[in-house]
Each structure stands twice: as C-alpha cells, then as structure tokens.
Image (tube, rainbow, N blue to C red):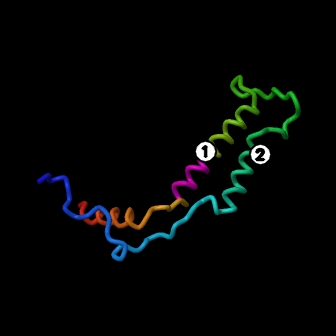
Amino acid sequence: MDRGRSTEPDTPPPDRAAPRSRPLREPVRNPWLWIAMAVVVVAGVPLYLPTGAIRPLVGGVPFWLLISVAATVAFSALTCWACLRDWNLAEPAEEAARERDAEVSP
C-alpha cells in the first residue's frame, strides 16, 4: 500500500460536512470597493492637468506618467487586497479537508 495515500474518502458525506468557519463572501458585492476602484481610475487619468502639460519633469519623465503608474500600482494593490482579504468561496468539503490537514500537520 502506498504510504502517501490515505484510506479515508476525499470528501465527507453531505450530512457530516464540517460547518463553515467563515461565511461565503465576494468583494464584488462591496460598494466601497467599487467606489475606491473608481477613484483610483479617475485619479490615474490626469485630465485635471492642463492640456499638453509636459513640465514638470521628474527624472526626465513627465509628471503625468508617474501619476498614471502610481494609480496602476494602487489599482493592482487594491484588487489584490480585496481578493486576499474579502474573498471566501471555499466549499464545505475544501474547508473540511483544510481542517483535517491542519490537525495532521505538526
């Protein structure tokens, strides 16, 4: 018999499924996330600067480019934060397996 394999079934029967430790959540349903994303996108398009503005240059790069890059990084960070913090779509079988693995691991 292979030592790496377990003789237990992969998923528990539905009547013995472990209760969820966290409720299912989706960040898409959070209105503040949408508002924050809209603010970052509007800030990233520097329409508030004068037309044709190239000055001031920062390190030889127009200031508007730095604003756009900073907004892009902020949008990416906001999206990652929302996915890592607010997203919980694990199924009960996945949660039960995670808890079983945590009990077995030292």
Residue at left 59%, top 47%?
77
Q: Is residue 80 left or right of 48 when viewed as pictured?
A: left
Q: Is residue 40 left or right of 105 when viewed as pictured?
A: right
* Mark 2 element type: helix
Question: What residue occupies the far left of the structure in this picture?
Answer: 1
Location of residue 42 (image quadrant): top right
Question: What residue occupies the far right of the structure in this picture?
Answer: 51
x and y, in percent, of residue 95 in the image: 39, 65
Crowdedness near tag 2: few (<14), some (14–19) or many (≥20) residues, C-alpha within 10 Å: some
x and y, in percent, of residue 62 in the image: 75, 28
Location of residue 6 (image quadrant): bottom left
Residue 42 shows which numbered tag?
2
x and y, in percent, of residue 20 in the image: 43, 71
Residue at left 52%, top 67%?
24
Q: Quadrant of the N terminus?
A: bottom left
- Residue span colored magenta: 77-85
**Dot 2 amino acid type:** Val
**Dot 1 amino acid type:** Ser
Which residue is tagged 1? Answer: 76
